Image: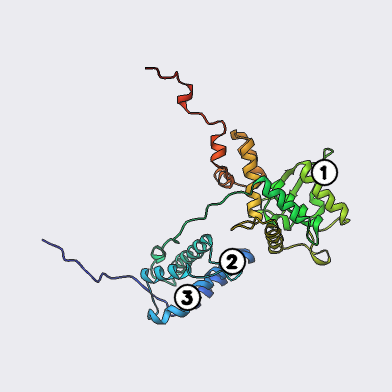
Amino acid sequence: MLSPINLSPPRPAIDAANLSELVEAYIIDARLRVKPATASTYDYLLSYLLDWWGEAGPALAYRLDGRGWQIFEGWLRQQTSRQSQKPLALNTRKACLARCRQLLRWAYRLGYLDRDFSDQIPQAKGSQPLRSAPSLDQLQRLLSAAGQTSRPLRDQALVAVFVGTGIRRAEAAALAVEDVAFHANGGGVIQVRKAKLDKPRRVVFDCACGEYILALLEGESLTTGPLFCGWKGRELTPESIYRIIKRACKAANIDQRGRGPHDLRRSFATEWMRHRRDAGSAQLLSMQLGHSTDAMTVHYSKQTIDDLQDGFSSPLGSMQPHTQ
């Protein structure tokens, strides 16, 4: 017996006329469960869904199914960031679609929907741009450019702390003068109190980094309070730090896509792995960067084909040469 082809298969769909109310209920619930900053991120990501649905909802008769989610994914690829006015990064689009899936799973779990529709949401299309850590020459130019700003001691120390310790910009923004302890050789230890995932740690810096930190402390007479200050001695925000580094990168003519504090963190990881290739050193690097897994640490190291060729050896090199 032959089975006929059904050219109009049923497509489970959501009656999404009240989608904005569902999103609002989800955000209200999230504010009770997660940190305010995290809830704000959820709100920001889902605002793209609501903007699109305000345009597409009437055209789709407020019926949201797999085809509609595919249209939404394509719409996201055409959008620009509200912060930078640049095309939405792949990671942002991934995060937006992931949050939409979480929204639908939450709605099913709490009875707002009669089934879990999250499997209808596609993955974000596209590939990550090739990332590389700034070279030593570029880092030197960056330090020089940071020394030509209106706050040279602060800005050079900021670059030096990123390059010399590998900490995150939010961690740098929260540093206080009291968090820095010097050793006799000019190096020392920084207590990172406000770390990612609420996991404080200590990081080490060498005497080269220490020189910039000490110049900042002495030059701006800092004895207490924020290590990196803005106007009227106020603590710099992570966003302010990002702008400071980006301006210095532009002045140093190394302002390629992605050049910012995170690339300086990559530089630290890359140089560490380049000169320390044993497993024990990888574990120490994870401690310094605040990673919970070695896989994440390896992801940050952006070594090149030159590193691969340096000291390369295969089993053939240990074998006797073949003779005719």
133 w.r.t. 124: above or below: above
Residue 46 at x, y = what percent?
52, 70
Residues marked 1 and 3 touching at CB (< 8 Å): no
Residue 21 at x, y = what percent?
50, 78
**Residue located at (57% from left, 33% from top):** 310
- Around disc 3, counting alpha carbons within 10 Å, would you say few (fewer than 14), some (14 to 19), or many (20 or more)? some
Q: Amino acid at mark 3?
A: Trp
Question: Which residue position is annotated with label 3?
Answer: 52
Kindly tell me whether residue 10 is visible in this rendering. Answer: yes
Quick one: SS at disc 2? helix
Mark drawn on residue 226: none
Gap in angstroms between the C-alphas marked 1 and 3: 53 Å
Q: Amino acid at mark 1?
A: Phe
**Residue reaching furthest front?**
324
Q: Amino acid at mark 2?
A: Thr
Callout in the foreground (1, 2): 1
Gap in angstroms between the C-alphas marked 2 and 3: 18 Å
Residues marked 1 and 2 touching at CB (< 8 Å): no
Gap in angstroms between the C-alphas marked 1 and 2: 37 Å
Quick one: SS at disc 1? strand
Question: Which residue position is annotated with label 2?
Answer: 41
**Residue located at (74% from left, 55% from top):** 145
Residue 259 at x, y = what percent?
63, 56
Quick one: SS at disc 3? helix
Question: Which residue position is annotated with label 1?
Answer: 182
Q: Quadrant of residue 153?
A: bottom right
Labels 1 and 3: the sequence-earlier one: 3
**Residue located at (45% from left, 71% from top):** 75
